[in-house]
Amino acid sequence: MINHEQEFVALINQHQKLIHKVCYLYLNDMNDREDLFQEITLQVWKSMSSFKGESKFSTWLYRIALNTAITFYRKERKSIIVLTEVLPDKAEETNIAEEQLKELHYAIGQLSKIEKALVMLYLENCSYNEIAEVLGITANNVAVKMSRIKTKLKELSKQNAGSKI
């Protein structure tokens, strides 16, 4: 029979890519990302008894990871990284040109922490309902925020392109 520790380790191993993406989203330094990964893992361990299975485990994990990352970021006052480690997989799938990808990275780097979290979940192909559950807001609020973020990203990309001329 599997004990709780083995089950926990198996879940962390299964979902570690998700945790790493959150770490890359919020921190630039590799050592800081490792510290954040450990902090997220600790918070998940402490919260395991509160997981009731009412949502997917990954949704619940995203919520803990993002909340921990935001708290960690505020505490450490580190600079936020552009989604350079999160976007390439999506970029390959959609064949975005390298220059466009750079402009997109720059634009995403200008977003707030919450906006970056929304973009990351969106790029993970989460539904608006899943994003809402992770962030603790309504699906309608997610739709409104995503619409605003898309507009903001277009404007920031144009500004970045204009500054190169």
Image: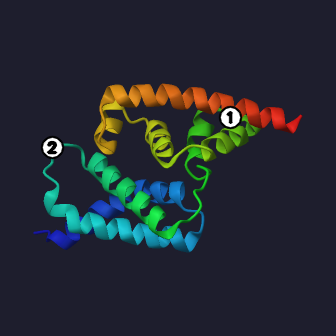
Residue 151 against residue 42 in the figure, above or below: above
Residue 131, placed above or below residue 50: above
Residue at the location (58% across, 26% down)?
Answer: 151
Per the image, the residue denoted by label 1 is 156
Q: Residues within 10 Å of mark 1 (few under 14, many from 20)?
A: many
Q: Is residue 8 visible?
A: yes
Label number found at residue 129: none
Q: Quadrant of residue 91?
A: top right
Residue with the most extreme right position: 165
Instruction: Report whether residue 96 is seen.
Output: no
Of residue 50 and residue 57, the one placed in the foreground of this image is 50
The structure residue drawn at horizontal position 25% and vertical position 50%, both measured from the top left corner, is 57
Front position in the image: 83 or 160: 160
Callout 1: helix, strand or loop?
helix
Question: For the residue carrying disc 2, how many other residues have a C-alpha within 10 Å: few (<14), some (14-19), or many (20+)?
Answer: few
Residue in view at x 43 percent, y 35 percent: 125
Please provide percent x and percent y for residue 86.
Answer: 55, 49
- Image quarter where the C terminus lies is top right
Left or right? Give the position of 153 relative to 74. Answer: right
Identify which residue is drawn at 56% across, 39% down.
90
Kindly identify the amino acid type of the residue bearing the numbered disc 1. Leu
Whole-percent x, y for residue 127 in the image: 36, 31
For marks 1 and 2 on the same chain, the one whose residue lies earlier in the sequence? 2
Q: Is residue 156 left or right of residue 61?
A: right
The mark lying in front, picked from 1 and 2, is: 1
- Label 2, secondary structure: give it: loop
* Residue assigned mark 2: 54
Q: Which of the pair 23/145 is nearer the observer? A: 145
Residue 32 pos. (x, y %): 52, 71
Q: What is the spatial separation of the Cα atoms under label 1 and label 2, in whole angstroms?
A: 38 Å
